[in-house]
Image (cartoon, helix red, strand yellow):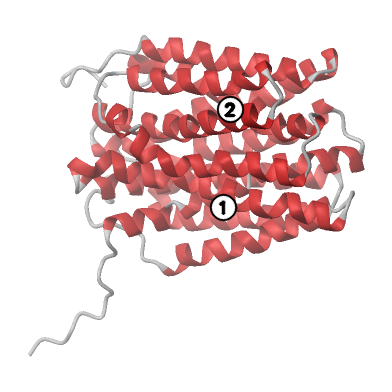
């Protein structure tokens, strides 16, 4: 008789992708975006200008860009699962550092580390998710949408915690919020550490395929504009809600609506994401995102802000998914990690330049409305650029 195989049975694809989605939950949903919830109190307590506040997201984006640039090499050397785990742990460490000091240099380093870890984990986890989804072509885009909803889970979870911690402990309690975020991230990281993540197909070839940038430069330009444009909305909208008179409940509700909308993404956009039509899918979703970013300029009512959060959120998460779908449709599996990394780099450059520039505009004109104007304009231009990307020919040089 043969002895039983001691290795655990492979997880169901959807379950495994949901566990992988915890990497962007921690690295992006909490590690990156929870900063927006704490920003107003940090700015008041630490005496920051809008430019200084924007710099914290700029240096986070610089770390994200560095992580994206290094991701393919890290994956090739250490493997996909190791990159996912260590990148997520780096993001977790950065949250604790934010709670330990109000020093500008230490906080800057923490935000840099958060970006680097988030990008490395994201690229590796997205490549793993694409490989897992490949085994079920009919459901591939739906499964990938589940992965990208992970960021929304982090936004939702932090939105349910941070505003009320600030309200309970009062002004100057921003560091307590960072401890709360650290504990939340620890709980979400545990399944990533305990679950076998590697898939059997395609791992040996991961990060070894060639990926040419020239045929998709216009598409990368559109994604760059998305990175530069979305960040103003995600950085300053909580401050905008607060300036409009919104308390902890209003801030939490607004942020949670963005997070909740991520869970509708697989159903709202699966038909669009399934189209192998060059950059058109991305252009459509990015256009909707621009509308969502512009809506607060038309009114400050709670209903209007809620519609803005939902429209922005349901498209925001789908844009990232559309870039992975574009890579899947146009390149062989061995090139997917490099392709996803290239998209992440373009995105990272945009979000590196965006926050400080928009913060400077806000300081110069004294109103956050200008930041939202710039945000919506860049998103609209990104949609136009993506629309010009044609589908790559199967036999074209890559």
Q: Count the numbered circles shown.
A: 2
Residue sitting farthest toward the left: 1
Q: Nearer the viewer, residue 267 or 319?
A: 267
User: Left or right: 388 with respect to 154?
Assistant: left
Percent position of residue 169, x then y: 85, 57
The residue lying at 68 percent from left, 42 percent from top is 112
Percent position of residue 318, x then y: 42, 33
Residue pointed to by mark 2: 308
Percent position of residue 351, x then y: 61, 27
Q: Quadrant of residue 32?
A: top right
Neighbours of disc 1 within 10 Å: few (<14), some (14-19), many (20+): many
The residue lying at 36 percent from left, 34 percent from top is 268
Answer whether residue 210 is visible to the viewer in this image: no
The residue lying at 44 percent from left, 51 percent from top is 21
Q: Relative to 47, does residue 279 appear above or below in the rendering?
A: above
Residue 330's tag is: none
Whichever of labels 1 and 2 marks the residue nearer the N terminus, that label is 1
The residue lying at 19 percent from left, 47 percent from top is 136
Q: Quadrant of residue 322?
A: top left
Q: Quadrant of the C terminus?
A: top left
Q: Relative to 349, does residue 387 appear above or below in the rendering?
A: above
User: Left or right: 299 with respect to 40?
Assistant: left
Residue pointed to by mark 1: 26
Q: Relative to 182, does residue 333 appear above or below in the rendering?
A: above
Could you tell me how far apart the alpha carbons at marks 1 and 2 are, in whole angstroms?
Answer: 24 Å
């Amino acid at each position: 008789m043969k002895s039983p195989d001691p290795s655990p049975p492979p997880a169901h694809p959807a379950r495994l992708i949901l566990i992988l989605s915890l990497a962007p939950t921690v690295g992006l949903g909490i590690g990156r975006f929870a900063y927006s919830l704490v920003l107003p109190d940090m700015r008041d307590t630490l005496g920051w200008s809008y430019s200084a506040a924007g710099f914290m997201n700029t240096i986070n984006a610089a770390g994200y860009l560095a992580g994206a640039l290094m991701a393919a090499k890290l994956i090739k050397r250490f493997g996909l699962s190791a990159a996912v785990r260590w990148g997520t742990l780096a993001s977790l460490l950065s949250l604790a550092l934010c709670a330990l000091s109000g020093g500008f240099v230490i906080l800057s380093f923490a935000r840099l580390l958060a970006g680097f870890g988030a990008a490395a984990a994201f690229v590796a986890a997205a490549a793993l998710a694409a490989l897992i989804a490949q085994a079920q072509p009919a459901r591939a885009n739906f499964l990938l949408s589940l992965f990208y909803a992970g960021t929304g889970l982090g936004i939702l979870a932090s939105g349910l915690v941070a505003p009320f911690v600030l309200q309970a402990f009062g002004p100057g309690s921003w560091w307590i919020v960072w401890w709360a975020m650290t504990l939340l991230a620890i709980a979400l990281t545990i399944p990533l550490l305990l679950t076998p993540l590697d898939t059997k197909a395609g791992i040996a070839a991961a990060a070894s395929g060639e990926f040419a940038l020239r045929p998709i430069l216009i598409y990368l330009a559109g994604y760059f504009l998305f990175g530069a444009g979305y960040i103003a909305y995600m950085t300053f909208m909580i401050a905008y809600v607060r300036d409009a008179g919104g308390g902890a409940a209003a801030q939490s509700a607004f942020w949670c609506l963005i997070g909740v909308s991520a869970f509708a993404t697989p159903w709202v956009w699966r038909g669009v994401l399934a189209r192998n039509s060059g950059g058109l899918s991305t252009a459509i979703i990015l256009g909707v995102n621009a509308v969502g970013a512009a809506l607060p300029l038309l009114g400050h009512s709670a209903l209007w802000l809620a519609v803005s959060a939902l429209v922005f959120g349901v498209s925001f998460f789908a844009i990232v998914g559309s870039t992975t779908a574009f890579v899947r449709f146009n390149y062989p599996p061995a090139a997917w990690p490099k392709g996803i990394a290239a998209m992440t780099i373009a995105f990272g450059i945009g979000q590196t330049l965006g926050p400080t520039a928009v913060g400077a505009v806000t300081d110069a004109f004294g109103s956050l409305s200008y930041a939202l104007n710039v945000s919506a304009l860049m998103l609209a231009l990104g949609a136009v650029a993506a629309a010009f990307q044609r589908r790559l020919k199967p036999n074209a040089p890559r």
